[in-house]
Image: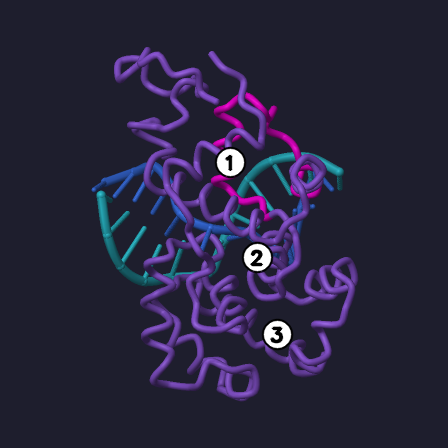
Chain colours: A purple, B blue, C cyan
Amino acid sequence: MNDLSITQVYEQLHAAYGPQSWWPADSPFEVMVGAILTQNTAWTNVEKAFASLRPVTPIAPEPLAALAVERLAAAIKPAGYFNVKARRLQAFCRWFVDAGGFERLIHEPTADLRAALLSVHGVGPETADDMLLYAFGRPVFVVDAYTRRLFGRLQKLAGGEDYEHLRRGFEAVLPPEVELFKEYHALIVVHGKQVCRPQPRCAGCVLRQSCPTAPFSLAANTGLKGR
DNA sequence: ACCCAGGGTCATA
DNA sequence: TATGACCATGGG
């Protein structure tokens, strides 16, 4: 079995799936709304929620903050956890308006901006980092459930590492390039949805030469060396 | 009838 | 600080 570096995993995923050009949204603000809606939720349901919400209100901070929370909840129903997420969206929108919107926030150092995002009710580490990377263009590595599963299967994780430990680990190894970080997280998610599933395990995985939990039966030895 | 999905908060020990 | 309960829809 080969032992791929973090950089080599990126190269293989990129070679297999190509550029992803994430995040799927019409504007930086919609990136942030989507980041909250997609918490522990399939993206297909988030798309339905956007389609349901769009006729009700403009997807913009002031209108969303002003909308009655019950109406907002009803409008985002397909995303699941709609009562929770309606409150979180409004808490976020109020903070965003109070903070002066992109005009002001864009000038904040990344560490300060991250701390401010984390202070908002309903914005945890992954949601904050989604926003920092895909809405603010900061070189922050996003860690999610797919990241943990993939690198866990590649035997690079023990399993108990907390979020900050993992984020710093990736950021210490990778060059701090925004486009690289955007692509890497996108590729991990795409690979996770299509291939690196809980079960059945790793069907047709491009990393099968290096992934101990990939099935042996299929193309166990094609002569590749997994660089 | 299950399991799973691009998390986070809160109460309890 | 470390688990566990809770939130809820929709697709496979």
Q: CA distance from mark 1 to mark 2?
A: 18 Å
Q: CA distance from mark 2 to mark 3?
A: 17 Å
Q: Write down the region rendered in magenta.
A: A142-166
At x 47%, y 69%, the residue is A83
Local crowd size for mark 2, using a 10 Å CA cut-off: few (<14), some (14–19), many (≥20): many
Please, what is the three-letter code of the amino acid marked with disc 1?
Tyr
Examine the structure image and report whether residue A223 is included in the region drawn in magenta: no
| 1 vs 3, front mark | 1
Q: Secondary structure at mark 2?
A: helix
| 2 vs 3, front mark | 2
Q: Position of residue A124 (x, y in %)?
A: 63, 56
Q: As displayed, is residue A82 above or below residue A52?
A: above
Q: Secondary structure at mark 1?
A: helix
Would you say A98 lies left or right of A195 here? right
Q: Earlier in the sequence, mark 1 or mark 3?
A: 1
Q: Position of residue A45 (x, y in %)?
A: 34, 61
Q: As displayed, is residue A118 above or below residue A194?
A: below
Q: Earlier in the sequence, mark 1 or mark 2?
A: 1
